[in-house]
Image (cartoon, coloured by chain):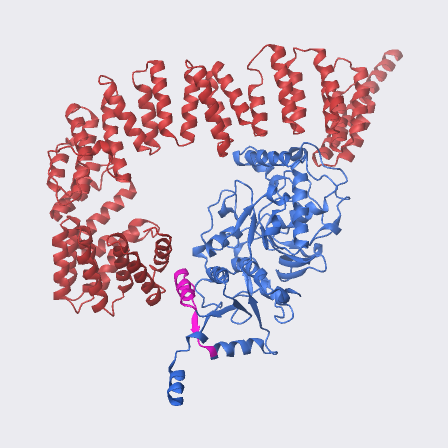
Amino acid sequence: MKYSVFIAFLILTGLQSLTAQTADERSTLRLAQSYEQAGKYEDALRFYRDLYRQSPLNSAYFEGVRRSLTALKRYDDVIALLTERMKRQTGEVQLWVYRGGIHLQKDNTDSARADWETAIGMNPRNGQVYSQIADQCINARQYERGIEYLRRGREALGSPQLFAFEIARASAMNMDFETAMDEYLNYLRTVPQALYQIQQQLTMYSEIPSALDAAVDQAREHVDEYPESEVLRYLLAWLYMERKDYASAYRVYRGIDDLKDAGGMEIIKFASRAYNDREYRAAAKAYGDAVEEYPDAAFLPQAEFYRARSLEELYAREGMPDELSGGGTRFPSTESVSSYQGAIQLYEEVAEKYSNQPVASESLYRIGYIKFHRFGDTDGALDVLERISENRRNVFGKADADILIGDILLARGDIEGAIAQYDAVLPSQQIEDQQRRELRYKIAEAFFFMGEFDTVLTQLEPLTADVGTDIANDALDLMALIAQYRRPGEIPLKRYAEALLLERQKKFSESAAVAGEIIETFAANDIADLAYLKRASLQRRIGKPREAAATYAAFLDTRDESFLRDRGLFHYARLQEEELGDPAAATELYQRLLTEYPHSPLAPEARERIVELRKGNS
Amino acid sequence: MTVILLFLATAMPLRAQQNILIEMDLQQTDHLKAYGVVYWVLTRGVDVDWLLNYKHGSFMTAYYPFIEQELRVRGVSFSVIDGSTAAQILAEVSSPDKNMEVVRLEKAPKIAVYVPPNFQPWDDAVTLALEYAEVPYDKLWDEEVIQGKLDEYDWLHLHHEDFTGQYGKFYGQFSTYPWYIQQVAINESMAKRLGFKKVSELKKAVARTIKEYVGGGGFMFAMCSATDTFDIALAAENTDICDVMFDGDPPDSDCQERLNFEKTFAFENFKLIMNPYEYEYSNIDMTPAFGGRPDNDYFTLFDFSAKYDPVPSMLTQCHVNVVAGFLGQTTAFRKDLIKKYVTILGEKEGTNEVKYLHGNYGRGTFTWYGGHDPEDYQHRVGDPPTDLSLHKNSPGYRLILNNILFPAAKKKQLKT
């Protein structure tokens, strides 16, 4: 019994001391780690050393000592520590790698190399060794040396794609983008699903022009060498688009399409990307080629529609593309530029060929839009839009056709019809708040044209609540116009509203005539100032710059008290600059503005124009 | 005949005696462009008088129609005054009982801005000011500095640079961002190309070269982190303060003790912040005492004797005395770490924060200004650029532009 108790006592105290010792060690270890995290390596080292002395086989303690000594740059001590441990643990490759790294820090490259050769020699087919050695080199900013070991590992393991990303990254850090790209491309050939991952890596350096150029050159070479690889071509196309070279990217996509025998699908994929990137020239070309070369493809309706759409956008941005010159149309034009005729013809073809498909409605909508907005052909536009069936009016999900019909009615002078049309659309769930506010503004504007100014003010008031919006600004402008120029009887302002309505209807000559009447009939009224400026701007629009110049000159000569004189000077100067081709006269007018009205809101722009004119950029 | 001559003499317009006065008080429409016009006039070979403390540092020059036109084009307000008015003004300024002085500006200084290759002008308050004021400048970087090109310039500007080689201490937040990675690659490539083992060694060499340039008579203006990191780099000449992620090896454990403060321009006895994840270099930088809000952060410019201290007077010409503060990686300088011979130009009263200082080294001078952008209280990476056309009268920016005209002053007047 006594012995049992004694033995139990021994076991218990032994366990207790064991537990106590472990608890102490844990606390000490935590303390050491805390010091290490706080950057207090001397203190950390003290505690790690204590632990290591007690348990020399414990690798965590050993690592703590090693790290602390390394952080303190006590390289000789680290070497001694590692050497001593190597004697006990001869097979631990890691120790040789570490020691080599320390030799490298001390610029003892021969010793470093010797240690690493030993490490490799222990198991030449251990890929991790090569990787760890490379890490040591790369951390020491010796990228070429690191790459050398990675390549050796690759060779030793007979795995050509091994360490591709590591070599590529190290090469890129060394600004050797050719090698980096070579690695990515070789890897990509064998692991096509890595395309996105490689693109992510390449975006790290895409801001460096030489990097992007090198990437493109290498990709091109690889594509030439491995013409059957689709993924290389995808990467090359992507690189071209990164470089904003869509024409070259398109050529690559054509190649992919041929290679995959995709029947034009790759071309469409490119065209869609280019369109979304607003590269309309490239998009138009691609869509056009797809349409011509694949007349039976399922994508044909969309391709034809977006071809027309791309050309329309291209014209809006750059002027008449070759594809849109000439061409007839069933719809007559009014006194506006008729350069959109070609686009209309294309849309007409789509609407006819695919009358039962959504692209038909979309095409008709675009025709209506062009006819109205570009040509001012209200009859033609209305005719087209009413062909869109009721259930297709929601062309792009925004009650587009219905709103456009309202705009057209207004332009035709059917103001009440326009108001009714807008009112009918207002409750629609399809439109967003922004569009709803715009519709309310249109209704208010319609009442303005009718001369019902009180109603206008009531309609506009709620729109001014959110002063950060464009609509609020427009509403405030219109309210200010009414407040400024309303007189008892309101006839001058009503006449001016008529002139504005005629302008909206693109009846510029008639509008200018009304403005002229206002000038003569209401010369004593401030509205005459507005009428002068409006008349001159209309004369410009109908291609009569000399008459416009005369109007501006008359305004400046006769309306000395007008607070719009700075505006008159500015627009007169723009006319001289842009249409009359007289930069000297323009400069003089801008300078007059600066002299006479230095605080005008137009003064900064006038200054900019003078600077541009001085540079010869008229 | 005598009567005729007398008549002609009195009837002739006094155009030859007319002057242009560019007032720099609160009536001025565009203070910043005014400096640009003055610079432009100097490039045309016309001298300009800087009337220190007269209507907050106005400028006067001979009347020429082309100058008047240029003022109008740039939107700078001015007056055309006759000779007698000009003489009265000069007499007033020269009067011994007025704290005013005339400084003749003769030559437009040649300006260099130290910027890396991927620099964007809107990232840097000084280049923003130079671009807005239409003052031309050249860009140079490490290679040009090491090759000795600094001697071709009168004035060198530095902004958000890091001469310690720690890549702006952006590691903690931005180490995986493409721009950071590119920055590291570009700097390491440059270091290697110029024969330096580490970027930090290259930057120290650049700092020393700039120091020699100033010693030889150059003018240096620095803002934000270019100020304290410059001095830290000089002090750390013989020690490694960079952690392993910056240069591949740990810092010297005794690097703090090995700092040599005799080598610095403005600061001494500062303590390094060694944590690589902390966005600070040392305790030189001070964040605002009252929580750093735009509505309670201001600093005051000191008054100097224009007649006896023309240099600090020039540097502090402003239409306000109290200027709105602004943050930066280096916002303000800890007063008790500033060397005794450095002149404090502006500070936050009642605190230890110095915002603006100036000193001499050899035959040259340095002027340092804490903060990143005077009209963007807290400018973060990726924030849109400041539009100076909305801040034409910015006192904070005006202080920067004082520095570009100061080297144009007649040499004898620059001795303090």
Q: Is residue B185 above or below residue B376?
A: above
> Is residue B67 covered in magenta?
yes
Q: Quadrant of residue A239?
A: top left
Taking depth in this image into account, of A405 and A600 the one nearest to the observer is A600
Relative side of B355 to A379, left or right: right
State the extent of the magenta-drawn residues as a range. B64-83
Q: State how many labels appear.
A: 0
- Residue at horizontal 53 percent and vertical 25 percent from the top: A178
Q: Colour of chain A?
A: red
Give the position of the N terminus of chain A as an image quadrant. top right
- Residue at horizontal 18 percent and vertical 51 percent from the top: A543
Relative side of A88 to A217, left or right: right
- x and y percentages locating residue A200 in the rendered image: 49, 27
> Is residue A107 covered in magenta?
no
Q: Is residue B164 above or below residue B5?
A: above
Residue B275 appearing in the image: no
